[in-house]
Image: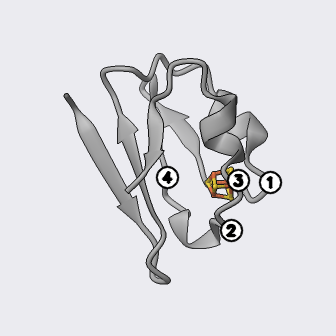
Amino acid sequence: MDIHVFRSETGVTIKADWDKCDGIGACSGACPTNVFFIVNGKVTAPDIDSCMKCGLCMAACPKGALTWG
Ligand code: SF4
C-alpha cells in the first residue's frame, strides 16, 4: 500500500491510499474547506489545517482511498 499521511496542527489525521486513488477529485469537490488538491493524478492535502473533520471527503470517494488516521 502507498499510504500518505496528512496531519494537522490540531491533531486531525487523514490517510490517503494512493494505490486506491484514481485522481477523480471527488474528495476535493466534497470538502467545504478546500483541503484537497489532485496533483499528478493523486490526492494531496496541503491545507490539512483547515480540516473541520466532517467526513464528507471519505463519504464522497468511491474507492475508499481516504480514512482517518
Ligand atoms: S473531513 Fe471534511 S473538512 Fe476535513 S478534509 Fe474531509 S471533507 Fe474536508
Q: Kindly state the secondary structure of the residue where label 2 is placed.
A: loop
Question: Of the residues tagged 2 and 3, which is closer to the observer?
Answer: 2
Q: Residue at x 65, y 42 (%)?
A: 57
Q: Nearer the viewer, residue 48 or 60?
A: 60
Tell me which numbered mark, 2 or 3, is placed earlier along the sequence: 3
Residue 43 in sight? no
- Where does residue 1 sit, x and y in percent of width and height? 19, 28
* Quarter location, residue 61: top right
Tell me which numbered mark, 4 or 3, is placed earlier along the sequence: 3
Q: Mark 1 belongs to which amino acid?
A: Pro
Whether residues under marks 2 and 1 lie with C-beta atoms below 8 angstroms apart, the answer is yes
Question: Of the residues tagged 3 and 1, which is closer to the observer?
Answer: 1
Q: Kindly state the secondary structure of the residue where label 4 is placed.
A: loop
Tell me which numbered mark, 2 or 1, is placed earlier along the sequence: 1
Q: Mark 2 belongs to which amino acid?
A: Met
What's the mark number on residue 45?
4
Mark 1 = which residue?
A: 32
Q: Residue at x 64, y 70 (%)?
A: 50
- Where does residue 24 sit, x and y in percent of width and height? 60, 19
